[in-house]
Amino acid sequence: MAWNFELVAGPFKGRTGGLAWDGKAMLFSAVQEERVLRYDPATSKADNFRRWTGRVNGIAIARDGSIFGAQEGGRRVVQFMTDGSTAPTEEMIDGTHHNQPVDIVVDKKGRVFFADAYNSQAPYGPPAYPFLPHASVLRLDSWGPRTWSLAQVTHDTVGPRAVLLSADEKTLYVADGDSERGDVCQLFAYPLNTHGSVGPRKMLQNFAFPERGIEGMCLDGDGNIIACMGWKKGGSPPCVVVISPGGTILETHPSPADAPMRVAFGDSNLSSLYLTAGDGGLYRAKGIGRRGLKR
């Protein structure tokens, strides 16, 4: 079955990034415009949800309705509270400031896992804090209202770009490697224990350099990974792939734009797939024969 994407919002300046369905509308980030917008499929309009977001890319919704944003420009994860305020989280790990978060996911316990990458675009301001000697997945643990601690989860990644939890939250999927930095891009599955720590990883996909690997991913209702990858610079063309939990590519579909960034299910019964891309658009494909996972 062909996936037919239509442009439903934009294009905006620069790339569009993170996606999250809030139950009625799709939140998405216009990264360079420093905005998180909310696309309402009932009205076909995209309005501001938050402005001046510090180049938020990945976004995730917690069970209490608050929304976490991976702030590339400000080198931190922020929490958009339901009262309209914005709260910072912990920025220091082992006495050092972390890197530039790009993608984020929240588990049922309220723990926040994020991909703490090195980005080609520098953060804001003078380099007051050096980058970490590693680019890893980090975890934020809450100890009370607006009180957080930060821990390193992966110790064998070179540049994580996307994170995802399995349906039972016993597996952490990590898309690792930034081809623009010369990395080999790979997709890993880490067993995740109840304490939020991981065991030895399993490689699900290995992309030959200089292929652009996976930049964003979500789950369908069967537990398969829906991932966006590829670009016109070389290697695999821009596409959206369906990958089984074991690492088999089940389907490949052309992307509606170059450098697809993030994917997420939305609309009634999570029956539509939304996609953001390097051209600054928000796209939607209806009736693809798959539905999103209801957590």
Image (spheres, rainbow, N blue to C red):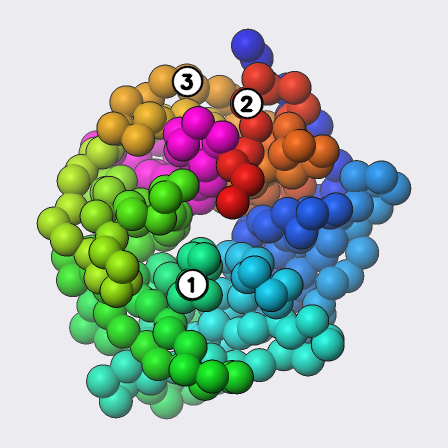
Residue pushed farthest left?
A: 200
Local SS, label 2: loop
Q: Residues within 10 Å of mark 1 (few under 14, many from 20)?
A: few
Residue that numbered label 3 is attached to: 251
Q: Is residue 3 above or below residue 112?
A: above
Camera-side residue of 220 and 15: 220
Q: In the rendered structure, which segment of residues is drawn in magenta?
A: 207-234
N-term mark: 3 or 1: 1
Q: Secondary structure at mark 3?
A: strand
Q: Which residue is mark 1?
A: 109
Indicate yes or no whether the magenta region holds residue 282: no
Does any portion of residue 105 appear in the rendered image?
A: yes
Q: Amino acid at mark 1?
A: Lys
Q: Is residue 226 left or right of residue 79?
A: left
Residue 109: x and y in percent read 42, 63
Front-most of 254 and 262? 262
